[in-house]
Image: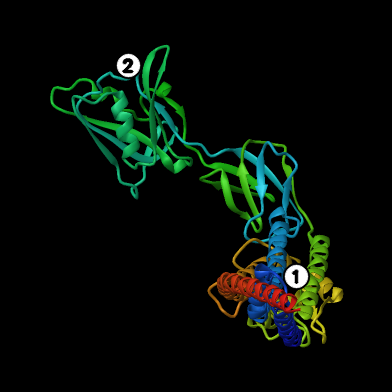
Amino acid sequence: MTTTSSTSSTSASTSTSTTSSSSATAKLLASLGASTIDSSGLADQLSAAQYAARIDAVNAKQSKVATQISDASTLKSMISSLASSLGDRVRTGDLAVTPTITNSTVATVSKGTLTGSGTSTLEVTQLAKGQTLVSPAMASTASAVGTGTFTLRFGTVAGGVFNADSSRSQVDITLTSSDTLSTLAQKINASGAGVSAYVATGASGAQLVIKGADGAANGFQIETTPAAGDTTLAGLAWTPAGDATRLKSTATDAAYTLDGVARTATSNTITDAAPGLTLKLTGTNTGAPTTITFSDPSSAIQTAMTDLVDALNQVVSTLTSDTDPTNGSLNNNPGARSLRQTLTTLASKVVMPNAASGQPSTLSDLGLKINRDGTFSLDTTVLGNSLSKNPDGVAAMFTNGLYGVYATFDSISRSVASTTDPGSLGGVITSLGTKQATLTTQLTDLQNQQATLRSQLLTRYAALATKVSDSQSTLTFLTNQISAWNNKSG
């Protein structure tokens, strides 16, 4: 709402107030000659006339503030929706290189921190496994395991030989006469040794099951140091040269060949298998390599940039209308000015600060241009050249990380929505909300004052009506008396 309309509204309110007052006065004078006075009507008109101008002024201010809040909220919502849409596109994966594998029983593939291209071959000959060892069978989980020290020593187990890892300390667990298979399992789990234990009860009785982490270096053997006179604890000891039936699984590394290069890994999840490729091995395919391919996001990126330009131009159009110097609701508004400045410098903003020399780092490198009138356009030639020369660099700009296109617009959205910054749209909306609450209080106060005045006027006019009625009665008596005298004299 502009100053001109506010002034016109005030003038109209003053004219209405004057007219209402004159009407009420004329009605009062007319009533003096009547037998009764319309007290309620007079009180309504005069109290309304007294407060009409001020109430209309507050209503006008409320209307202006409501419009400003609505328009600022619309702009804030448009920026938020733009950032959210970009985030959805990034998360679906069609804007970045995405790997797929032909034989999904061998591995699952996902994109890593970099981008990949072309095709790769994968052959898995061995999965990473952890060592699984069981104890001799006992009567039950409550069977005593003996008194002394139960020791776990780590290294590799291969060919009936244990090679200790000197870099890892042994784990000693102290046992007392009250310890059972069940409490031993609990103590192993609480030791922080990197192994887990539980008691399994099968056909032959209760057995302690100990499982190590994946990888050949995570093998282990068990040593015991029984207390004097104890004959039970020694039965839990195990070395590769001992009872082979107790070793249910040997600790091994994963073995695979990727792109013709034989490799090993201590885990079945390999995050650095190749640039842009994370593998989670799930099976073997010895002698039957499978193929991994990478998608080409060029077309999706071109579509996304076109959509981005369209969305930005919608924001610019709304912002231009709201900041029109003649009748814009947000003309000279700090939040709108801040958003305008952000959009003006958007094309040159560095969104990939860690990009290598020659790699795309700004939105202008993706073809985004700002025109003289503040609108945006897409230079498809620039975008096409970037995709052709630096496809990995462009794709990296459309990832869900600290930097990139989405991160940039998410940051802008958060800044625009900030309620603590008085120069943002969010801060402006908060300030206008406070002003709106103040105006509501002012309007309520004026309406209460008007009601109080009406009540007072009703009381006064009721008394006046009584006096007028008494005067009219006296006048009627005198008139009748004079008429009687005149008739008698005649």
**Quarter of the figure that contains the C terminus:** bottom right
Res 42 seen here: yes
Mark 2 highlights which residue? 138
Q: In this view, does 258 lie to the left or right of 137?
A: right
Q: How far apart are marks 2 and 1 (CA)?
A: 66 Å
User: Extreme top residue here?
Assistant: 203
Q: Residue 390 carries which label?
A: 1
Q: Are marks 2 and 1 in contact (CB under 8 Å)?
A: no
Element at badge 1? loop
- Residue 341 at x, y = what percent? 68, 83
- Residue 402 at x, y = what percent? 59, 66
Element at badge 2? loop
Q: Is residue 224 left or right of residue 249?
A: left
The residue located at (78%, 80%) in the rendering is: 320
Disc 1 marks which amino acid? Answer: Asn
Q: Residues within 10 Å of mark 1 (few under 14, many from 20)?
A: some
Q: How crowded is mark 2: few (under 14 residues within 10 Å), some or many (20 or more)?
A: some
The residue located at (33%, 28%) in the rendering is: 238
